[in-house]
Amino acid sequence: MTTVELSNEQAQPEPADSPSGWWQKIDERLESLGEYLNPILVKETRQSLKSRQFAITFGLVLITSWIWSVMAIYLRYPGILYSPDGPFLLVGYLDILLFPLVVIIPFSAFRSLASEREDGTFELLSISTLSPRQIITGKLISSIVQMLVYLSALAPCIGFTYLLRGIDIITIVYVISVAVLTSVLLSGFGLVLACITRQRHWQSALSIIVILLFIFSFGSGMSASYSLVYMEANWRMYDESSFWIATFAILTIYASFLHLIIDVASAQITFESENRSAGIRKALLIQHFLIIGWLGYVAIQIPEEAAFLFAITTILCLYWFIAGSYINGEAAVLSPRVKRTIPVFLFDRLWRNWLIPGPDRGYIFVLTGLFSGTATAYSLAWYNTFNGMNISEATHVMIYSLGIMAYTTFYLSAGRLLLRTMNLLFRADIFISALTHFLLLMAAIMVPLGFQVLYNRTMDSSFNHWTNPFWFFVKSMDDGNFVESPDVIMFLFFLSMLAGSLFLINIVLGAAELVPRREKAPRNFVEILPEDEPELDPLRPS
């Protein structure tokens, strides 16, 4: 065999189904994944793991866990030799783990983004090829890496509690997973709070509020770990399918909240010329369907119980009021970049109109979710009458749903009209909008209380707090015949008419902005869209 033939055999590629070929594909995928995550993840992970704060906290965790191990064995000796003391030690280790997970790591995520916005280094990230979502998820994954480091330090101690009996593996994995997921959610919430303001004095005040919030969460976590691990064991129904269905429902709602938090944080660091509302509204809609789906599933499974139907309308009205109080304060002016993304065809434009930012479109979007939730409660109440629900209870649900929806529609519509008036004088942003709706609701609660105190009257039928939706909720839950009384029916009729009138006024005043027109790009203007960017890569194979 000549040297040329040998070199040709060596140059032949390996078969695609060979082990080395599969490993090469996996290595390429991992390398591309690393290139996707590394720009922000490696930077944040190196800064956090090499910082003095991490070294001190990690050392304190190790020392505290060793002290607790010696102290717990000393306190329980000699009973620890034969009694099941695993839950007692596990509570201590969970409390030690909760401090870095609930306080240190979320506050570090908050300061990581806040300090970059204060010092002006965030502009370097904003002009890079990283999208806002990549920046937020990179910082969030960096927090998860820190959680794994702390968890690995306490893993031998937590495993030691299983050997002491009294605790099972499923409970250990369950409570640790809850602690980690809570830490991830608080870290994302810290990133959202870090984007509120750039001014140093406001950031200093906000830092105090954030650390107090996380400390309060740590105290609540200690109380929960003690009661769920050491005191109560009735919730550990691992052999029942309902327990795992409830766990899956909680996980889906948790995932939707985490998705919403990431979208909100990404929107706050996105340029104002971009569409910052589409992702948030999609996340809100996902949560809307999850609330209807899970509560509706339980209502169908237990048709004779009306509490879940009340929960659907109550939770959705509160949810959409909070969301609408922010959406009503969005900027009404659309950037040319957003206008160029509006669909050409009218039907497509109407169908995707709720994704376009703007207070009038957001107002319609919120009320659509509110009306659909009420219609779902009506449909389920009517359906359950064929499966065991009393007709009077179904009627109670329908009248209550109408009333609580009318309250929510009225205050959202009144708040939207107030913001229209404010925008004639100054720019009312989302924070002013939220404050306006909050003050409007507080006035509806406090004014009747003021008259009650002024005239020394009690809260009875002779002095009803008709403007207070919480009073209506409490009275409806306490007295099943309350919503069916003629006075309440008459009041709800006038309230519905007033809410509908305010809704029509808002529709007329915002009709010109409801369906915006598509704007054409200038003749010599070339816009590079995200899907076109790979074509500019000189290394991309043709």
Image (spheres, rainbow, N blue to C red):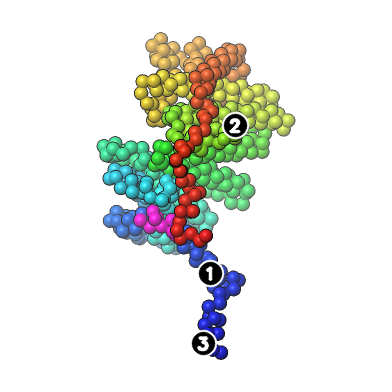
**Type of residue at label 1?**
Trp
Amino acid on which the number 2 mark rests in the picture = Leu
Above or below, 428 against 240 in this view is above
Dot 1: few (<14), some (14–19), or many (≥20) neighbours within 10 Å? few
Start-end of magenta stretch: 34-43
Q: Earlier in the sequence, mark 1 or mark 3?
A: 3
Tag nearer the camera, 1 or 2: 2
Secondary element at tag 2: helix
Closest to the observer, 241 or 104: 104
Amino acid type of the residue tagged 3 in the rendering: Thr
Q: Does the magenta stretch include residue 38?
A: yes
Drawn side of residue 425 relative to residue 511, left or right: left
**Would residue 234 be seen by someone viewing this image from the given angle?**
no
Q: Residue furthest left?
A: 201
**What residue occupies the far bottom of the structure in this picture?**
1
Q: Which numbered circle lies on residue 3?
A: 3
Q: Mark 2 points at which residue?
A: 346
Which residue corresponds to mark 1? 23
The number of numbered badges drawn on the structure is 3
**Residue at coordinates 67% horizontally, 34% vertically from top-left?**
303
**Mark pair 1, 2: CA separation:** 50 Å
- Left or right: 474 with respect to 439? right
Mark 3 or 2: the one toward you: 3
Give the numbered dot on residue 397: none
